[in-house]
Image (cartoon, helix red, strand yellow):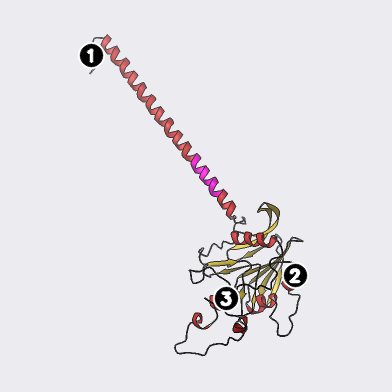
Amino acid sequence: MMMATEQQIKAFTLPAQTDPPRSPRETLPTMYDLPSEDPKEPGLPDVFHDHQPQLLLETFQPPAYQPDRFFAASDLNLYYTLQNPAWYKRPDWFGVLGAQKLYDDRDMRLSYVVWQEGAAPYLVIELLSPGTEREDLGETQREEDEPPTKWEVYEQILRIPYYVVFSRYTDQVRYFELTGCRYREVEPRDQRLWLPEAGLGVGLWFGSYQSIERQWLRFYDARGAWIPTYEERGELRAEQERQRAEQERQRAEQERQRAEQEQQRAEQEHERAERLAAQLRALGIEPE
């Protein structure tokens, strides 16, 4: 499918009403119509912006949702308003509850188009960089005719319930919860934020990921245990397989020992019978 140009998108107007009304999939821009890349953007600032979102993707496992009914992505265009359909933000990481993992259950997303998906993100996480820190923290004001800031989009337009910012330079994490119409900073004592609708929480964890030991953000479950990464799940499965193999070996050894004991008992019974028969013959009695 040919992708629309930015000029075509900006010229887009809402369609006239029809009877019966046509589906938004037919009348409004979809992810196939909107650009998924901006060649003017300089790209990700460092390797941390690769590893940290991946750790979040691996550990975001909301237990109340089937695996194909939640969506998470990093560095993906998030289109948020039909008033200006070419406008988007590109969160370092975001998660959506109740969204199909695949677009229309069949295609990997090129971008996330809120008016087509019907569900806004539940949680957005931004990783602070020197060039974006002020905007990430809501400390910038937009100029006239410019797109709204990230903070305005997340707080006022999409009304995303939870917003988290994390600095790799200071290892400081800040949590914001949408209360009424504004974000309110919350400061949990254990630096962990519980997300009730998701049934999991996010917090600071010190450990080794991708062979790099440092403070990371990752998700934890209702017991407070860190949700395992892909590698940890593989190691857990391997350990479970090793334990099952050991249990099978022990069961086989127990069966062998039982068989030997049965054989020994049978031999002892045979020997006793032989001795008894010999004693009877010595008395002149032929055993039956």
The residue at the point 60 percent across, 86 percent down is 11
Q: Which residue is mark 2?
A: 133
The mark that comes first in sequence, 3 or 2, is 3
Real-space CA distance between mark 3 and mark 1, rounded to the nearest whole angstrom: 99 Å
Q: Amino acid at mark 1?
A: Glu
Residue 252 marker: none
Tell me which amino acid carries mark 3. Answer: Val
**How far is mark 3 from mark 2, CA to CA?**
25 Å
Q: Which residues are magenta?
A: 236-246
Asked whether residue 9 is drawn in magenta, I would say no
Q: How many marks?
A: 3
Residue depicted at x 34% and y 22%? 269
Residue 62 drawn above or below residue 239? below
Query: Badge 1 is on which residue?
Result: 286
Do tag 3 and tag 2 residues touch (Cβ < 8 Å)? no
Distance between the alpha carbons at the discs numbered 1 and 2? 105 Å
- On residue 113, the disc is 3
- Mark 1 burial class by Cα count in 10 Å: few <14, some 14-19, many 20+: few
At horizontal 47% and vertical 89% (from top left) the residue drawn is 18
- The disc, 1 or 2, on the residue closer to the chain's N-terminal end is 2
Pick whichever, 210 or 34, lies toward us.
Answer: 34
Dot 3: element:
strand
